[in-house]
Amino acid sequence: MFRVDLETIRGELEGSPSINVYGLAFKEPIREDDPCIQALENIGYYDGGSRRLYTTRPIGDLPEPCRDSVSLGSHKAVTLKEVPVDGIRSIIKVYVRDKVLRGSRAVLEESDEVGGILDEVLKGLTSKGYRNVRRSRSVFHVGRWNARLTVDSNDVYVFWFNDELFVALNVGLDIDYNGNLWDHMAERSLDKLRSLVEHVRCRYILDIARGRPGTYVVANVIDRSSYEEKSPPMGYEELVKYPVVKAREEGLETRFERLMKKLVGEVDPNQPVLEATRAGKMGRRPVYIPAQYCIPVYDPRLAEKHEDRALAKLRELVNSIGYKGKLINAIARSLGYLSEATHLNIERIEGEKPLKVELVEVEYNGGKPSIINRSKREVSFTADVMKPLRLISIVKEVEEGRRVKIEIPVPNYVPATLRELDELQLLVLVEDGLDPLSFEIMDVVVENVTRLYEIVREVYEPLKIKLPKLRVHRQPILFTHGDYSNVLKEVRKVTGGKLAFAFILGERPADDEEDYYRPLKKVLFKGNVISQNIDVRKYVSDGRVDKRILMPAISNMFYDMLGKLGVKYLTLSKSTDYDLIIGVDVGHGEVEGSRIVGSVVLFDKMGRLMNLVPVYGLGYPGRETARIGDLLEQIEYENYAELKGKRILVLRDGRLTKEEVTQLADISRTKDCTIEVINVKKRTPFQQLSDSRVAWFVDIGDAYLLKTHMLKRDMLPRPIKIDKVKYVFAKGTVREERVSVDDLRLLRGLSHLNYSTIEGETGLRLPAPVHYADKLLDALRSGWEIERRYLRDGLLYFL
């Protein structure tokens, strides 16, 4: 983070009339929490009394939420001295954000210091054998793809702390096709274009010229005649000419013409039109983009294997500790008005053990185990009780008949779904065409996981904890990318439709947004099979299986398998003051025929996961998202939890609307309960430019940053943002309270309730209730089948 030289900024804003003042005419009365008002406040200062918008941005079009309800009136330009006192901070904040964005992009293109750092990155690539990579300024050319180092609007965060202004800055890579969808990828073939659409996301060439290249998800391809039959709001010829006209109006003509010459060339007067939706804004009205103006975004399924591997290595280098910090500091130095923020106070969270687990000490002397002792222990991480190397060594020692004393964790919960099974089938799926070493990996994994499972099952039997016997189907089932229907048939032949588990062995693409595992695990679940991926490339070195890496990883596979099957070991070390801790995520109508979709995850006061609840069908006219009050009432109506008389903590991403405040106050009155709401912001530009593994928080004015995790392999952790104010509802009233250090420590503890990975020195990035709500909603968006019995039982089949 960097401190802004406010004297320089004030001088620029006071020296000339660079602040636009627009009169606004509202077609009907508007509430303070209306999305339009929030959108206006994001671009400047809205004075509700005079109905004027003050902004350093020239406004051509109003923000989207305002376009149907507000029109622009009078306009004049003023200096900062003429802005109402209440609006000065907002004006400076927006001005600095835009200035940093513009300046950072220029620095990336023109700075010799940045160029030197990127030369080091290029050498790092070529030294690893990726020699077919070129660089021109801030762009790396990899085969048919351009990977551009960029600072976009999500990479800059500006905030006031006391009377000082600070900037958080990040950099990233945008990877686009070196050409357009119609001419170069589809080669002007309508059939080929339609076959590509499933995998294509694109950037609109006009947005690229504007420096705001959002991503569009393509839903449909329409030829010219079919488009004209739809009676769209814009005629075909007008649609094709639209970006040219807008670029001229917005003063972007030179940049736009340069992009057109490079990526399009001659405009096809009969090209098809793409019906698309802005990514992340499902449920909004579709937009229509001529196919030549679509620049495909990188997707591994559209790339050659050598391109995919080179781009994966490039991302790894740019995002590493070694280079990202250098790039960000070089940008800040070049801008000239940013200096290192040395006086923000980072508070470390150390010395506490947030988790508790029950353990049994067991002696093996050949034959059945005998239990020596049973105890509870407070621990810091899952690895404190599931020691990867020790678990695997147990298998060998027991099989050799040695006298062995071991500690094994005892689950506090085994779902009824699992207890009711006598046998659980274990399947193995293998990607067709893999190296023979993959089958050696398969044999080692299956042998050790099954033996470890049997040891644990034998220990649990005298404790009256039942796990089903594991029956292994040793004949691997082969699969190929995109063809999963036959896999499902083969799986059903083996399992008969009963609950089963599968390991999937393959070479998973580096960009796992759209790889084989997501669609394959969804298909498998239609056959009642829960699955876990094993990327075989991780375990091969110098032409052989590297057991030094594989053997500890098998313990993680084992723990992940039990976690997805709903077996829980960990709780918080201390009981909280809450009866229920609820994670909430809401959607925008992507599923169930454009009805509202939400997910709710319930934990008890000890941090035990109780239920996962998909909620849909709560839409009302004009709404885009479900409301928290609706979700709470739904979980009580469906008997997931009782609210009456309870103290409830709700964690969600997003601020409360006025309607939600009214709802929650009413629920607190009718149910005689207390509800506290903390806003946990998942997506932020902040990253820690060091490898510190200590949890910490820092005050940044109206929020805290909280860092709980550490990424592996030289990657940089990304803290979450916690609003400093929480809302407390009781007896029909609402009050605001400051989030306390104890609240932050609780959120940190919840982030260590990781049911699918053995963590050595870290936890989840998000508190577990929010993490699992986010993952469940992501599965719902992707069309996963809802199996309420499994969700009610706590099976994490969608991970």
Image (cartoon, rainbow, N blue to C red):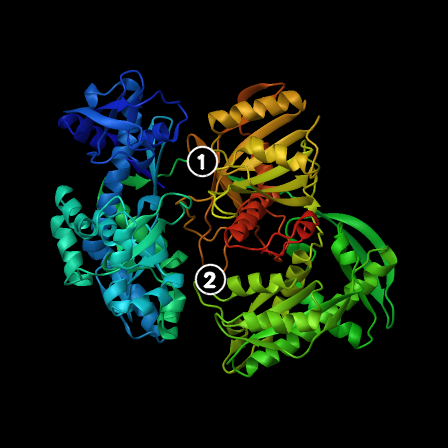
Instruction: List the single residue furthest toward the top.
Output: 49
Quarter that holds the N terminus: top left
Q: Residue at x 19, y 53 (%)?
A: 240
- Label 2 or label 1, whichever lies nearer to me, is 2
Tell me if 595 is positioned left or right of 329 in this view: right
Instruction: List the single residue furthest toward the front.
Output: 229
Q: Nearer the viewer, residue 102 or 252?
A: 252
- Give the Cα separation between the discs numbered 2 and 1: 36 Å
Q: Please say if 485 is above or below 624.
A: below
Q: Which residue is mark 1?
A: 345
Q: Nearer the viewer, residue 740 or 268?
A: 268
Quarter that holds the C terminus: bottom right
Graded by Cα atoms within 10 Å as few (under 14), some (14 to 19) or many (20 or more), the crowding at tag 2 reads: few
Q: Please say if 77 is above or below 176.
A: above
Q: Which mark is residue 567?
A: none
> In x, y percent, where is residue 232?
27, 46
> In x, y percent, where is residue 235?
21, 48
Q: Which residue is mark 2?
A: 512
The amino acid type, in three-letter code, at marker 2 is: Asp
Residue 741 shows in the view:
no
The amino acid type, in three-letter code, at marker 1 is: Asn
Q: Residue at x 69, y 59 (%)?
A: 562
> In x, y percent, where is residue 72?
22, 27
Q: Nearer the viewer, residue 291 or 387?
A: 291
Q: Residue at x 55, y 33 (%)?
A: 628
Q: Please say if 685 is above or below 269.
A: above
Q: Earlier in the sequence, mark 2 or mark 1?
A: 1
> In x, y percent, where is residue 655?
47, 32
